[in-house]
Structure formats: C-alpha cells, structure tokens
Image: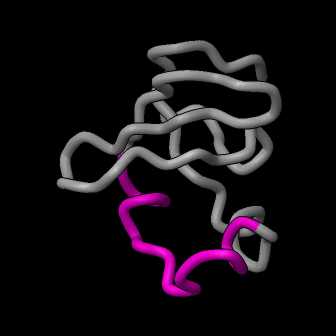
Amino acid sequence: MAFKKGTMVRAIREKLENSLEAQASDSRLPSYLFDSKGEVMDIKNDYALVKFGKVPTPNIWLRLDQIEEFK
C-alpha cells in the first residue's frame, strides 16, 4: 500500500519485533503501537513519521513495511 499523510495506521508486531529499529531502542515495545491508531505525519524514503494521538508520546519513525492501514 502507498501511504500518504493523514493515513491512519498501526504497527505490525511481527515486522517490528526483532527488527534493527527495535534492537536500537528499548526492547519492551508499548502496546499502543499495535492496538491504537496512529496518523502518518510525514514520509521520507522508506519511513513514515507516525503520531499516536491518544497517549502522550513522541512521534516515531517506522519503516513502511512495519505499518498497516488501521481499519
């Protein structure tokens, strides 16, 4: 899928766990990444900047293959 700004997404657990990005951070991934809606704020190359709005957290860059449209 081609994501664009404003698309509502969530992280795909299987693709994010054990990824290079997950290994570079705290290994305890918060459940809101997988259970709540995030909004694509920006896209650069193979990454999307995602804002999870219902919780007070910083925006996060995720690879495009690590997210899916939230339906």
Query: Which residue is more in the foreground, 34 or 39?
Result: 39
Determine whether 23 is above or below 47 in the image.
below
Q: Percent position (x, y) of residue 52?
A: 34, 44
| Residue 70 as seen in the image, left or right of residue 39 | right
Instruction: Assign the N terminus to one quadrant of the image.
Output: top right
The residue at the point 50 percent across, 76 percent down is 29
The residue at the point 54 percent across, 35 percent down is 49
Determine whether 15 is above or below 70 in the image.
below
The scheme the figure's colours follow is one colour
In which quadrant of the rendered view does residue 21 lie?
bottom right
Determine whether 17 is above or below 39 in the image.
below
Q: Percent position (x, y) of residue 6?
A: 45, 16
How many numbered marks have been drawn onto this rendered protein structure?
A: 0
Q: Residue furthest bottom?
A: 27
The residue at the point 33 percent across, 51 percent down is 58
Query: Which residue is more in the foreground, 52 or 26?
Result: 26
Q: Percent position (x, y) of residue 10?
A: 52, 46
| Residue 4 as seen in the image, left or right of residue 34 | right
| Residue 46 as seen in the image, left or right of residue 69 | right
| Residue 7 as seen in the image, left or right of residue 1 | left
Q: Is residue 24 magenta?
A: yes
The residue at the point 59 percent across, 76 percent down is 25
Q: Percent position (x, y) of residue 18?
A: 77, 79
In which quadrant of the rendered view does residue 67 lie?
top right
**Numbered range of the magenta stretch:** 21-36
Q: Is residue 49 magenta?
A: no
Query: Which residue is more in the foreground, 56 or 32?
Result: 56
